[in-house]
Image: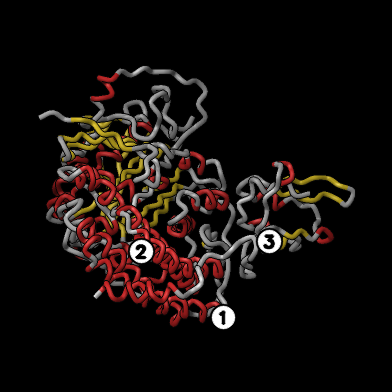
Amino acid sequence: MTLPSLLRRAWSNLFKRPATVQYPFKKLTPPPTYRGRHILLKERCVGCGLCSKVCPAFAITMVSTEGGTLPTIDLGKCIFCYQCEEVCPRGAIKRGIDYELATWRREDLIKK
Amino acid sequence: MVEEHVELVEAFKRGLGGGFLSYEYDAKRRALKLFVERGALTKAFELINEACGGEYHVTTITGADLGGDEVEFTYSLWLLPQKLRVMIKTKAPKSDPRLRSLVSVAPATILYEREVHEMLGVVFEGHPNLERLFLPEDWPKNFYPLRRK
Amino acid sequence: MSTTKVIVGPVHPALHEPERFVFKVDGEVVVDVEPRLGYVHRGIEKALTERSFTQGLYLIERICGICNVAHTLAAVQAIEDAFNVEPPKRAKYLRTIVHELNRIHSHLLLLGVACELIGFDTLFMLIWRDREAVMDIIEMVTGNRVMSAYNIIGGVRRNVSDHEVLEMKKVLEALVEKVKQYKEVFAEDPTIRARFVDVGRLSRAKALALGAVGPTARGSGVKVDVRAEEPYAAFDEVPLNAVVYEEEDSWARLMVRIDETLESARVIEECLDKMPTGPVRVRVPEVAPQSSEGFSVVEAPRGELLHHVYTEKGNDKPLRYRVRTPTYANIPSVCEMLKGGYVADIPAALVSIDPCFSCTDRVALVDVRTSERVSVDLLTLARRYWR
């Protein structure tokens, strides 16, 4: 009973394409609900620092620049939970779907 | 509370007498909390054994140092025939943190007692092997991580 | 009779997570077992007393990657119990759906791993390819394949759209067909039966006395399933039938998991049909509104999981947080089931309880200021039985 059903599957699999996706030549796009790299809308940020206080991984630091105080996210520490997006009163942090975050040096992971 | 819960409470009152302090029933979670003296623990477990014919399941032992001068213990049990969650609570003073081990009555408590011992410094008298469970061998003695300062 | 000691672990190809077992063997038969836990001990219970409730929730999620939804569900239920907050109905249904999806993916993972362990790589690859469909819908609903970050105190973080509901139904229908085929394979394939039947015997009396939980207990005839006995989330309105097998061996434990996968798919379909409309979240205070304790018991894929929290009024951190994971409860049963078997049967018996030692070793730790070196000789080491 089982031998024929597995054999049937094996036979049909012989003529199908392999299930592996040949990354990096073909890249999969995650769904729009995916939690990837953050998008910071600088003009909306008021520098309240709530994102930094609530981050469970202590990955956000508030840095003073000429445009005001802005959050800097260390992608090496970030766990992509997006509590920062939830708590931001102005909606300045948005969810993105970029998942290719590798860099050559650890310092480059700190998003300016 | 339904009849089986009342029966259990009555059995405790009869069997433990002064050792049984009070009870509380949480209707939302269907859980019965029974507060007993620490000396009455073994008898309490024997009563539970009788009440459900040996068909009970020990979930865990929680030891908590809540900042006072006592350590509170919660023995969480699940009684299969009555489908009831029972939490037996007892306290021990920090100056004399000793309890009788329940391994002979309920073999499932063997690892939980070791964990409470190494984290809170409680001695379970009669335990066959009260050794370290999670902490490494070179952890300093008499340093109990879950005790509050 | 002379006994030799065979040490398995902490890093070993047959184990997926580090743990050290010392087996005393006489020829090929295992006479005694000593487990040594603690290799993945991360000090989580202590760390949770130093983080706020929401921050701690993300740490709790990472106690175990495979059963992360069960851990967050138990945590939010315990904290809601202590805060005396009730989540909205729709949130309970959504929690149940993601909880059961997590269970399906975990069981398929284990079935694949069990096949791989006995050398049946083809079936391992086939099961894992079907598991990919489940990971894709988890990614669609929660935003990530593994770490869902879906449950929050007071409800769930995201709503589900109609398109997502249709997608879930489509994927689950296809999955159920495949799992029924796998059930036939597991029930009748001679290789699988030769390796798993009569291996790792655990009698019903011993399972109950030693505190076994989950499929380990249900494969030995003990009918305990938290979802059926102490219903939580939406299980009071969408009842579930506990799956019990009487054969008391590794094969029974694997069959329990296959049947549970089918049962979970049925529960998800019913929840999707019956889901009420309404809000998915209520706001809760940052600090505890009363000094009390809360506890919550859920059925993680590996068994009964308990979270117990003590709160203090006005404090935004818990006073004491206790987690008791299912694999921890199964350790005495594992030692019992390995005795009397062959050395070659050790991987087959061990994988049937679905060991998750990341879950087991998460008790308290504080930074060590002085470390005392204690030298232990072989004689003392040999005397360390846990019995």
What percent of the width, then of the height, locates residue B56? 20, 54
Specify few, some or many for label 3: CA neighbours under 10 Å numbering under 14, 14-19, or 20 or more: some
Which label lies toward us, 1 or 3? 3
What percent of the width, then of the height, locates residue A48? 77, 52
Residue nearest the viewer, comparing C75 with C181:
C181
Determine which residue is flagged by label 2: C123
Q: CA distance from mark 2 to mark 3?
A: 33 Å
Residue C163, which numbered label?
A: 1
Q: Chain of mark 1?
A: C
At horizontal 38% and vertical 18% (from top left) the residue drawn is C374
Specify few, some or many for label 1: CA neighbours under 10 Å numbering under 14, 14-19, or 20 or more: few
Disc 1 + disc 3, Cβ < 8 Å = no
Sequence order check, earlier mark of 2 and 1: 2
Type of amino acid at the residue the image marks with label 1:
His
What percent of the width, then of the height, locates residue B34? 27, 50
Type of amino acid at the residue the image marks with label 3:
Asp
- Is residue A1 placed above or below C64 in the rendered structure? below
Colour mode?
A: secondary structure
- Is residue C19 placed above or below C306 in the rendered structure? above
Which label lies toward us, 2 or 3? 2
- Element at label 2: helix
Residue located farthest toward the left when viewing the structure as drawn: C1
